[in-house]
Amino acid sequence: MSKIIDISAKLTNERPKLKLAEDKIYEIDDRKNTILQLNQKMQNADLNDLNVIDEMIEVVLGKEVAKEINDMNLPIVAYQSILIAIMAAVTGEEYEAAEARFHKETAGQ
């Protein structure tokens, strides 16, 4: 008889959420096809072009939310935190781990 490995309890369609303020909670689209689209955008992007940030946010949070965040007129360091949080959510890791990896990768550049 073959062995059955049951991972059904690990599979969920529940989306991670990003909280920017008490009344600003957004669902992150972490589905495979969305992340493939995000990866493609990141590979083809000039990371010195700040418009890329808006495009990346739009891919995982949607056009409306990206516009809402843009209208907040946040400092660039806040966008850095948002992108780290998004990457943590889509990879299933804690924010602090993603932040440490980000700082390690940017220090090596």
Image (cartoon, grey):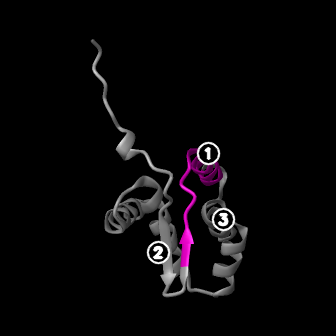
CA gap between label 2 and label 3 equals: 15 Å
**Gap in Å between the C-alphas at discs 3 and 1?**
19 Å
Q: Nearer the viewer, residue 7 or 17?
A: 7
Residue bearing mark 1: 33
What's the residue type where badge 3 is placed?
Val
- N-terminal label among 3 and 1: 1
**Which residue is the extreme one toward the front?**
1
- Earlier sequence position, callout 1 versus callout 2: 1
Q: Residue at x 27, y 12 (%)?
A: 1
Mark 1 or mark 2, whichever is nearer to me: 1
Q: What segment carries the magenta color? A: 25-42
Question: Which residue is identified by label 3?
Answer: 52
Main SS, magenta residues: helix
Residue type pointed to by label 1? Asn
Asked whether the residues under the numbered discs 1 and 2 touch, taking CB atoms below 8 Å apart as contact, a structural biologist would say no
Which callout, 3 or 1, points to the residue nearer the camera? 1
SS for tag 1? Answer: helix
Q: Earlier in the sequence, mark 2 or mark 3?
A: 3
Q: Which mark is residue 81?
A: 2
Looking at the image, residue 2 lies above or below residue 108: above
The residue closer to the viewer here, 107 or 71, is: 71
Residue 47 is situated, as x and y percent measured from the top left of the image, at: 60, 62
Q: Is residue 38 visible?
A: yes
- Between disc 2 and disc 3, the foreground one is 2
**Amino acid at dot 2:** Ser
Q: Residue 40 in magenta? A: yes
* Mark 3 element type: helix
The CA distance from mark 1 to mark 2 is 24 Å
Q: Secondary structure at mark 2?
A: helix
Residue at the (45%, 61%) spot, across then down: 89
> Picture coordinates of residue 92 (x, y %)?
39, 55
